């Protein structure tokens, strides 16, 4: 959607960052004192190049990461994700910085980091379980009655087909990103997700990721200290 005339965008109580599938930064009032994030309008959009100097004067929101089902604090770094967002006349831009050891696999997405924004659409939708429709399960089509639980997943990005430091663009006609697996999706449950597929569907999301300390640490020594953070710009 294009954004015209707005001087700021306020994302309130309905945005979520999912990192490595099982940890989320929730800005709903029952999880943290952060109730909204203000995204100011800027005359010049930041470049998606991984350089923090492109985001110099924009507010940084520090939000605690919590296990979406365990409700335990995220154990890496200080347990927080740093979020920045701005917009121009056409797009909204995000920068996420998440502490964590570098892991990557060209064969298995579950051995890579993953990221997504999530916006509430249906009035009954919950952030936990990506909509939380009680009858969703592991579905191939959304069950009848789940529409009120719908959420929008913007730039749901799984990384195995990508390279660090490369900017990947969007595509027209559908939400599936066949190159970078950076899909534009909707969901009514965590295992009931679909690429945008109606007559207005497209994938407008661009993105770049990197790690500030990219020495690979194998899962067998996952307890080893390897400082650094993932950076996602979208």
Image (cartoon, helix red, strand yellow):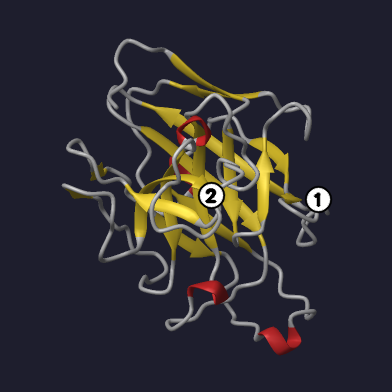
Residue at x 50%, y 28% (from the top left corner): 122
Residue 9 x/y as whole percent: 47, 19
- Residue furthest to the bottom in view is 220
- Residue at the disc numbered 1: 71
Residue at x 48%, y 35% (from the top left corner): 145
Residue 17 x/y as whole percent: 58, 45
**Mark toward the start of the polypeptide (2 vs 1):** 1
- Left or right: residue 174 versus residue 33 is left
Residue at x 49%, y 81% (from the top left corner): 105
- Residue at the disc numbered 2: 136
Residue 31 x/y as whole percent: 78, 35
- Residue furthest to the front in view is 144
The answer to whether any part of residue 56 appears in the image is no
Cα distance in 3D space between marks 2 and 1: 22 Å
The answer to which image quadrant residue 159 occupies is bottom left
Q: Residues within 10 Å of mark 1 (few under 14, many from 20)?
A: few
SS state under label 2: loop
User: 15 or 230: nearer the eye?
Assistant: 15
Q: Quadrant of the N terminus?
A: top left
Residue 56 x/y as whole percent: 51, 36
User: 173 or 169: nearer the eye?
Assistant: 173
Checking the image for residue 128, the label placed there is none
SS state under label 1: loop
User: 115 or 22: nearer the eye?
Assistant: 22
Q: Of circles 2 and 1, which is in front? A: 2
């Amino acid at each position: 959607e294009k954004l015209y005339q707005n001087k700021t965008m306020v994302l309130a109580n309905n945005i979520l960052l999912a990192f490595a599938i099982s940890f989320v930064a929730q800005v709903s009032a029952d999880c943290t004192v952060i109730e909204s994030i203000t995204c100011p309008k800027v005359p010049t959009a930041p470049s998606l190049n991984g350089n923090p100097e492109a985001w110099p004067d924009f507010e940084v929101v520090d939000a605690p990461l919590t296990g979406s089902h365990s409700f335990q604090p995220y154990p890496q770094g200080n347990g927080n994700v740093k979020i920045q967002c701005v917009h121009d006349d056409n797009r909204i831009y995000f920068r996420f910085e998440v502490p964590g050891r570098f892991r990557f696999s060209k064969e298995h997405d579950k051995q890579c980091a993953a990221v997504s924004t999530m916006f509430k659409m249906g009035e009954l939708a919950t952030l936990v379980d990506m909509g939380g429709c009680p009858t969703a399960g592991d579905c191939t089509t959304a069950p009848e009655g789940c529409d009120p639980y719908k959420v929008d997943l913007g730039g749901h990005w799984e990384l195995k087909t990508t390279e660090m430091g490369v900017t990947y663009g969007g595509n027209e006609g559908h939400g599936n990103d066949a190159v970078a697996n950076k899909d534009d999706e909707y969901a009514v449950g965590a295992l009931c997700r679909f690429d945008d597929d109606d007559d207005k569907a497209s994938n407008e999301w661009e993105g770049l990721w990197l790690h500030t300390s990219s020495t690979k640490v194998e899962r067998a020594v996952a307890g080893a200290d390897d400082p650094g953070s993932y950076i996602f710009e979208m």
